[in-house]
Amino acid sequence: MALTIISLIKQVPLPSEMRMGEDGAMDRTKAKSIINIDCQFGLGAGLQLKRQHPEARMVVVSMGPPPFENALKTALSMGYDEAYLLSDRKLGGSDTYATGLAISALLHNLGFSKDAKEPFIVLAGRQSSDGDTAHVPSQVAECLGVPQATFVERIEPNADGTITARRIIEGGYQMLQLPVPCVVSFTPTGIRPRKASLVGAIKARHTAIEVKSVDDVKMSPEQQALIGVNGSPTKVANVENIESDRPPIVMAVGQNETQLVDSLIENLKKGGNALIKKEAKEKRETDISEFTIVDQRGDNKGIFTWAEVVKGDIARPSLELLTPARHLADRLGNDTKITTILIGKNVKSLAKKLFEHGSDEVVVVENDKLEEYLILPFASIITQIIKERKPEIALFAATTAGRELAPRVGMRTGSGVTADCTALEIGDYIDKKNNQVIRPILHSRRPTFGESKLATILGFVYPQISTARAGTFAVPTVQAGREGVLSSFAPKLDDDDFKTKILETVLGESGLQSLFDADVIVAGGRGTVGDGLELVKKLAQALRDKGIKAEWACSRVVVDDGFAEYARQIGQTGKTVRPKIYIAIGISGAIQHISGIKESGKIVAINNNPKAPIFHNADFGILGNYEDIVPELIEKVQMLSSIDMNALTGN
């Protein structure tokens, strides 16, 4: 039986040309577009797989307006055989839930589902640059009823028909064995796509793209009610520009590297240039005195969180969740309880830690097969508990596990998911059309469109599900001796839930925990890869030798080019950190990176480009070459006294 390789792609505007209307919809009219970067690596993986399966059928699929045919033509010129575009005005404004549902309907119509007689594999990019949710691969996998692997770098076919995937996780990687059919999404650290050949370009010119409508793919009336702006379970309620709160940068002055570094150290000792929070602008209030107040929650009550277990302990991002959860519970009132789901092997003893950090109840599921996280059984267990308990809100940390688990659970519960939130509040939704106010409702706020906008997303199906960006919220203060209700749950699981096998888990010296705890973070960008970030690491070590809690990190491009592991990536698609001092070396300062460091006490920028955006988002700066400035800075650190070091870091 010949294998079918299906690549899902999306055409996106260039990040520099992204624009958003006041209604939250993307304005693409004047923006140049390209194939989403992550999707290109999915295309590359498909072409690589074709070499090992020469007889494979190559299919590329997209959903969007007619101009998306350009991206499909590019894929055809690279070596794909068939192209399909799902295009229909009914799909306009679809959220990720509706998108996953619609794409799955197209694939079903083409004959691809878990019951398909011919083997197939669906490949996709990790996420799109205009949304950065990473939801759609999980949602498509759930709708097709097949296993999945996300954040994958490479895959290898096996003689028994399965595939082996190397998946990035915090602090290392996993080797997974997946049955076919399955869905796999790729990171930009994967296989780079090949360029189109002349023969391929000629072939693409003469290959027709089949455009299908919602009716063509036979979406049922029930399914059609769940697509488009009106059917999507989540909606964009508000969009605001993100503005910097930092005053103008103080640049180091001097005639040489020594003088520049001395100037920087003196500026740091003086302090100043602190982050100043701007007062929120007054908003024009709508008169709702004649509106009807509507509570849509019904029997849904309470807040659920999921506690991820890594190396036998609760992962820090899962503890961070309890801070916004408590805030939301207090705002909801009426004795709203926080329930945390704890899954694993011999994990009951960890409930004490959750109680002391704020959980009111811990629901424990223990099973020897669940020692390590696996998407299918974990999604099944959490869904079963949600359907039985009916919470109004469910929160997941936006780790590699949480970012694939939440959308799969959301698909099973019919809920939309808001990704990578940096703020969670309880508020109202004013429905002017029907003269009513929906109250209370979760306001999930997340940076979007290259971190240039802050969108407020509302969910209208319960539970309202959101993921919270790691490092955004502080870990709650421990209340020693605090107790809660300890419950157990016996889920119904079958063999299909364990189709995916973990072959190996490699957790190295990740820096994940220490990045959150560090007082000083030294981060390298593209300008530091010449020596493999060696000087970046040496500066962090010099600080540690002086008794400073210091760690090294990097920007996304460094990870994408293979110079550092994903766990050290700072920014929108990495970690959010808040050290006392963040030293950005050779980092251009793209807004995606700034989003992960903007809560830092002081930001120091070292760059040889006077026009680098990082200088507009930092407190102190040095204009100079990495190879010249950093050795001098290391030497100065080694000479500083403990008193001087404390003065620098504010200890």
Image (cartoon, helix red, strand yellow):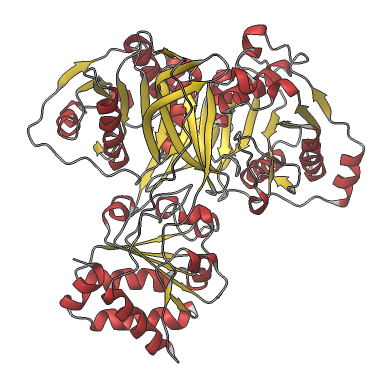
Answer yes or no: is residue 134 visible: no
Q: Position of residue 419 (x, y in %)?
A: 47, 35
Q: Position of residue 619 (x, y in %)?
A: 39, 68
Where is the N terminus found, in terms of image quarters? top right
Image height check: is 502 above or below 15? above
Question: Is residue 179 shown left or right of residue 380?
Answer: right
Q: Position of residue 25 (x, y in %)?
A: 64, 35
Q: Residue furthest left?
A: 481
**Quadrant of the rendered image containing residue 90:** top right
Q: Position of residue 134 (x, y in %)?
A: 53, 36
Where is the C terminus found, in terms of image quarters? bottom left
Image height check: is 632 above or below 292? below
**Quadrant of the rendered image containing residue 406:** top left
Question: Is residue 641 shown left or right of residue 340?
Answer: left
**Viewer-nearest residue: 479 or 560:** 479
Residue beneath the point at 66% across and 24% down = 103
Question: Is residue 245 shown left or right of residue 540?
Answer: right
Answer yes or no: is residue 594 visible: yes
**Quadrant of the rendered image containing residue 63:** top right
Residue beneath the point at 47% across and 80% down = 627
**How many badges with numbers are in the image?**
0
